[in-house]
Amino acid sequence: MRTILTRAAAIFAAAVALAATPSQSAQAQKALVYCPVGIDETGCTAIVNAISTRYLGGVDKGWDGTNGTVDLATVDVGRYSVFVVPSLADDSTESPYAKLRNAAIAQRLDNFLTGRIVLWSGTPDQGSASRTEKDALLVNFVAWADANYATVRGPGLVVLQDQSENSASRYGWVAGLVGIHVVADAATSSYAGVRTLDAAGGTLMSYAGGQFAFTNMASYGFYLPAGAAGISLSAVGQTGTSTGGQVVLITSPGGNTGTAVVRTDRDDYAPGDTVTMTGTGWQAGEQITITLHEDPLTHGDRTLAARADASGKWVNKDFVPELHDVGVRFVLTALGSSGVRAQTTFTDSRTVNGVTLNGGATVTVSPGES
């Protein structure tokens, strides 16, 4: 009897805690910085200090759950509006990028990193010189990267310079996170300014009525040997001549920014609620394959279907979260027969309808609409 009551009380306490948890929207103003414990903690701290005033929900450090970090293997990545990777370096004694190369963690991040992407060949998280400008540059990066969180419901990505000892392996881990095959340009050059090539570059480099300019602002560079759809080369190093230097800034507008967009009618559902999924901007008559991936994984991916009408719109109402889905975030991927792809996320965590205690008494927990 006592065991049954104890278990019922525990379930009820968990339900109350869950009901008190803010919705995804309320938690959106939160950032996550990749911080390998014991490796270049100064750079990590510099980023956290620079961007902390922007995020009302705070800035978390991501690693393995020790030393004040959150565990990248289990944390709900979708609650953050940006993920920042500091400038680090793999060498013969340390491998700070190893966790990002871990297949399971890379896959989790890949599922959620649907926002804008910034790759910068510089180290604004390092050194005390030009600290005001470096901090402002970091704020520009995260502000641009997280700007479409409300649309994609997943974090943007900011990657700073990979200074690994083996230049051929630099940025190799990026492909596992967002599918961009970036190669380091190891030719040694340093730039005190840049020449922007598009609107994104102009926005990111804007500072005090002009552009950022400080010693060793960027160096080396990178390129895309195989190209990449939707990726822009947004700035090159300023050489002082009409010819630009190496590419030092790469950007991507993120998911749900092309012609095809997928949305859900809410960002958080209770068990038993119907999830209304809608698509716009697809080709007329296009067949849409809808995949729902769970995190944490409780069972395999669900596959649904829809067909775009003559105006390129579609609706699917075939999914209803169940009780065992409480606490799960779903990654929704819509793939058209034309190859067009769009993504968003939603959660099942808003309401626990009731807990039946020993003896038949039922306690209802209902926090209301988020």
Image: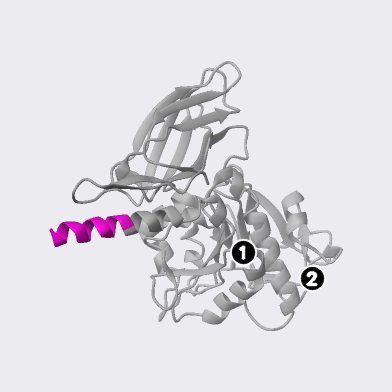
The span picked out in magenta is 1-12
Three-letter residue code for mark 1: Leu
Give x and y (percent) for residue 214: 77, 74
> Which residue is disc 1 drawn over?
56
Tell which of 212 and 303 is nearer to you: 303
Say whether residue 175 is visible.
no
Identify the residue at image location x=39%, y=29%: 304
Tell which of 261 and 190 is nearer to you: 261
Task: Provide the secondary structure element on which disc 2 rests.
Answer: loop
Give x and y (percent) for residue 172: 47, 60
Farthest left residue in view: 1
Give x and y (percent) for residue 297: 32, 49
Task: Provide the secondary structure element on which disc 1 rests.
Answer: loop
What secondary structure do most residues of the magenta stretch adopt?
Answer: helix
Q: Is residue 337 magenta?
A: no
Reply above or below: 6 against 37: above
Tell which of 161 and 99 is nearer to you: 99
Q: Is residue 195 left or right of residue 342?
A: right
> Which residue is disc 2 drawn over?
213
Mark 1 Cα shell of 10 Å, populated few (<14), some (14-19), many (≥20): few
